[in-house]
Image (cartoon, rainbow, N blue to C red):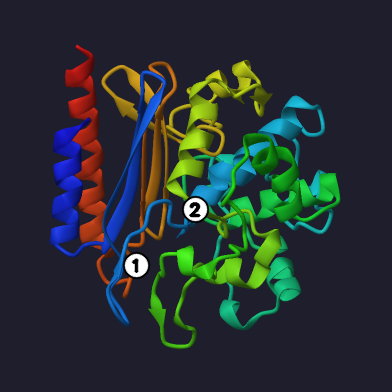
């Protein structure tokens, strides 16, 4: 299935933009999984094994944080236009709402001096006191800080860690066997960057803020496999239900296909990016380590891509991003041609 898309990914591997990739498609209720290339190139070459575990980076934002915020919204435990200060009383930006955080329109200035040397509590306090810039409510400025704050809100409401809440509300109901903040079998994890201070990073989160915040980070930190990501995608394509377990309401999932930004014109949903292709809206999200999920809710089709493009170094960002966009366009064109 999708031979042109497969060939494109093979070329990315041959061009050494990434060591390898685990990717899959959902179409007509069935899923196909592919595992190509290597999981590591240093200190020695390692073959990519089926169902290897990846640091999925910012896919955490939709996989975990957005999903649980939507659940709490459905349950009446929060409202989308609630002020953040209602839940985080020491948060300094009085005008910022949950909607602003979910749509990346809060205008929060993300710079934190000496960020990587702070303790978890010091980093939390710094995030709670970030100033609001000029773009408040008017432009999308993609940041991690908004989703870290959303994670703090979830923990405040549920009085537990994000890791435990996710296990109870999403992971166990969907039987996600390898999705967690702390993978048990590190040898199943594909390594990410070779860091000057941390060495070869394997089975530990790549993102600096998530590394400090641990189980309390809503922007990054999850590890997962292709199979688990496809299971989550099935749930979304089935409008919130999978194998008899309802995670989200149907109306909630369908509402994500519309623009939720304050202006209604910025192509952001609640947590998700809205990717437009012709007259169709797709849900889309990426991860810094080289991951993305693309969902066609109405046609019940998905494209899930996991890679460790930051291995062994993170010096290919601009080229990778341009090629990733071409890969997605290749898939969409091939998909539409098949559906005619």
Q: Position of residue 87 (x, y in %)?
A: 82, 47
* Residue 310, label in figure: 1
Q: Secondary structure at mark 1?
A: loop
Residue 81, visible in the rendered structure: no
Residue at 20 percent of width and 60 percent of height = 319
Q: As displayed, is residue 236 above or below residue 251?
A: below
Q: Residue 215 is drawn in which quadrant?
A: bottom right
Q: Is residue 91 above or below residue 293?
A: below
Towards the viewer: 321 or 195:
195
Where is residue 143? Give x, y as percent.
Answer: 51, 55
Q: Nearer the viewer, residue 185 or 143?
A: 185
2 or 1: tag closer to the N-terminus: 2
The correct choice, above or below, for 186 with respect to 273 in the image is: below
Q: Quadrant of the N terminus?
A: top left
Q: Are marks 2 and 1 in contact (CB under 8 Å)?
A: no
- Element type at marker 2? loop
- Horizontal and vertical percent position of residue 212: 64, 72
Residue 201 against residue 107 in the figure, above or below: below
Task: State which quadrant residue 42 falls in.
Answer: bottom left
Question: Is 260 positioned to the left or the right of 6 in the image?
Answer: right
What count of labels does the image hold?
2
**Picture disc at residue 58:** 2
Of residues 5 and 46, the one nearer the viewer is 46
Q: Quadrant of the C terminus?
A: top left
Residue at point 71%, 64% (across, down):
129
Which residue does the image show at 43% across and 51% down from the upper left? 51
């Amino acid at each position: 299935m999708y031979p042109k898309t497969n060939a494109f990914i093979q070329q990315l591997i041959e061009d050494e933009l990434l060591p390898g990739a685990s990717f899959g498609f959902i179409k007509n209720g069935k899923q196909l999984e592919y595992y190509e290339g290597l999981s590591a190139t240093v200190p020695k070459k390692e073959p990519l094994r089926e169902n290897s575990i990846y640091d999925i980076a910012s896919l955490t934002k939709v996989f975990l944080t957005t999903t649980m915020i939507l659940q709490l919204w459905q349950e009446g435990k929060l409202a989308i236009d609630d002020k953040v200060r209602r839940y985080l009383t020491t948060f300094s930006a009085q005008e910022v709402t949950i909607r602003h955080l979910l749509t990346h329109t809060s205008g929060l200035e993300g710079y934190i001096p000496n960020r990587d040397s702070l303790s978890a509590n010091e980093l939390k306090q710094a995030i709670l006191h970030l100033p609001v810039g000029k773009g408040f409510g008017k432009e999308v400025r993609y940041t991690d800080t908004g989703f870290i704050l959303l994670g703090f809100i979830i923990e405040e409401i549920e009085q537990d860690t994000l890791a435990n809440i996710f296990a109870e509300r999403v992971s166990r109901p969907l039987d996600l066997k390898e999705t967690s903040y702390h993978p048990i079998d590190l040898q199943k994890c594909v390594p990410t960057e070779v860091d000057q201070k941390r060495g070869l990073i394997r089975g530990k989160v790549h993102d600096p803020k998530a590394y400090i915040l641990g189980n309390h980070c809503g922007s990054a930190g999850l590890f997962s496999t292709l199979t688990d990501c496809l299971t989550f995608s099935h749930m979304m394509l089935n409008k919130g239900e999978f194998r008899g377990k309802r995670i989200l309401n149907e109306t909630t999932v369908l509402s994500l296909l519309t623009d939720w930004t304050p202006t209604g014109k910025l192509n952001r949903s609640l947590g998700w990016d809205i990717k437009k292709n012709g007259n169709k809206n797709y849900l889309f999200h990426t991860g810094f380590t080289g991951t993305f999920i693309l969902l066609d809710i109405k046609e019940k089709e998905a494209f899930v891509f996991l890679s460790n493009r930051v291995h062994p170094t993170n010096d290919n960002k601009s080229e990778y991003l341009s090629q990733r966009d071409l890969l997605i366009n290749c898939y969409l064109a091939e998909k539409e041609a098949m559906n005619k």
